[in-house]
């Protein structure tokens, strides 16, 4: 059955309305509540890091703003594209996601990378039996012959394709692990802080999926807080809290001690890896790139 674009949009909005009116959805009880999405999937170990970071950031300015608390909005594995629709329609107040020029025009970004640029360092989830094949890859042209699983709405998919890589775009996050295990794609690039935890979680269900960090894809790709376009008060609070956390060292301390990122340290151990550099032209004129205080360079440690 073929749907026209207007029908597709109506179906999406009807789905969201049913979702948000269903039991268990957390809406604002108080005007100062800050609403965020509950975990998007069973395989989402990085979610807890961003919750702790958000609480840390808000704590840096709590003396300047009315008392508030985080409220978690339940959902049925909402995709990244639909998550942004929820932000635009004022069902949630904060999202953290990778940026691109379109998102920065439509929403209000807080231009400080939440993982200091490490979102753009991508290790590879692969099948155990393919490990030797990947170890023999010495040039990008070899990897470009293989097929990567990536999210349908992820800017990563656009970046990979713009650099000549083959991509299978997948709507649902959990499905990518199954596709990899069942040989429907060859590898699944994950951020350096995501892949290890996700592989540990999925190994019981997909024991043939392993992580390879000898080869790393790299492109400039920050993950930002986004708020609704007119919510300048919240954006200012997040910006101030992040800068304070950077200046006083508490952001780096969270990265060093949190279970999802502590394995990255010491950073010097990443110097000897093979890196394939990709350009990211979808950033536009990203101001955060000019402030080196915000970024970590694993190759230069």
Image (cartoon, rainbow, N blue to C red):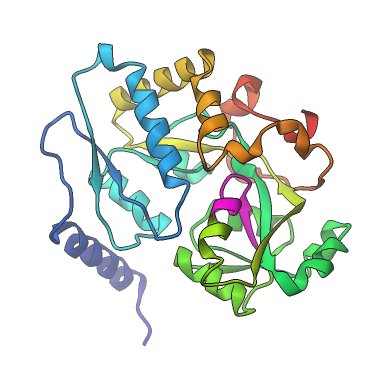
In the image, taking residue 113 as reference, residue 8 lies left or right, namely left
Q: Is residue 262 above or below residue 199?
A: above
Residue farthest to the bottom? 1
Q: Residue 34: where, in percent of width, then height?
A: 24, 34
Q: Residue 200: where, in percent of width, then height?
A: 56, 58
Quadrant into which the N terminus falls: bottom left
Q: Is residue 16 above or below residue 274?
A: below
The residue nearer to you, when weighing 48 against 203, is 203
How many marks overall?
A: 0
Q: Residue 298: where, in percent of width, then height?
A: 73, 34
The residue nearer to you, when weighing 151 against 9, is 151
Q: Is residue 108 above or below residue 155?
A: above
Q: Is residue 122 above or below residue 171?
A: above
The residue nearer to you, when weighing 288 against 247, is 247
Q: Which residues are magenta?
A: 188-197
Q: Residue 188: where, in percent of width, then height?
A: 63, 63
Answer yes or no: is residue 168 visible.
yes
In the image, taking residue 25 as reference, residue 162 lies left or right, namely right
Residue located at (50% from left, 29% from top): 254
Residue 193 belongs to magenta span: yes
Quadrant into which the C terminus falls: top right
């Amino acid at each position: 059955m073929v749907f026209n674009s207007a029908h597709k949009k109506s179906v999406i909005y009807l789905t969201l309305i049913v979702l948000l009116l269903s039991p268990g959805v957390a809406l604002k009880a108080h005007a100062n509540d800050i609403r965020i999405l509950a975990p998007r999937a069973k395989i989402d170990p990085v979610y807890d890091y961003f919750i702790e970071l958000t609480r840390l950031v808000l704590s840096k300015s709590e003396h300047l703003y009315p008392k508030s608390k985080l409220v978690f909005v339940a959902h049925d594995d909402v995709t990244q594209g639909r998550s942004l629709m929820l932000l635009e329609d004022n069902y949630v107040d904060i999202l953290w996601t990778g940026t691109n020029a379109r998102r920065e025009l439509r929403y209000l970004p807080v231009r400080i990378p939440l993982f200091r640029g490490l979102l753009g360092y991508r290790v590879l989830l692969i099948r155990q039996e393919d490990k030797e094949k990947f170890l023999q890859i010495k040039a990008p042209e070899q990897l470009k012959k293989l097929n990567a699983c990536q999210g349908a709405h992820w800017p990563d998919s656009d970046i990979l394709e713009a650099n000549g890589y083959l991509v299978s775009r997948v709507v649902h996050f959990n499905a990518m692990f199954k596709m990899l295990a069942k040989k429907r794609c060859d590898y699944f690039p994950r951020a350096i802080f995501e892949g290890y935890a996700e592989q540990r979680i999925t190994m019981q269900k997909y024991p043939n999926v392993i992580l390879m960090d000898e080869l790393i894809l790299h492109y400039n790709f920050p993950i930002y807080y986004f708020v609704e376009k007119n919510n300048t008060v919240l954006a200012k609070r997040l910006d101030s809290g992040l800068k304070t956390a950077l200046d006083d060292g508490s952001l780096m301390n969270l990265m060093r001690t949190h279970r999802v990122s502590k394995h990255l340290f010491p950073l010097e151990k990443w110097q000897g890896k093979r890196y394939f550099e990709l350009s990211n032209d979808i950033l536009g004129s990203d101001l955060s790139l000019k402030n080196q205080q915000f970024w970590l360079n694993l190759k230069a440690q």
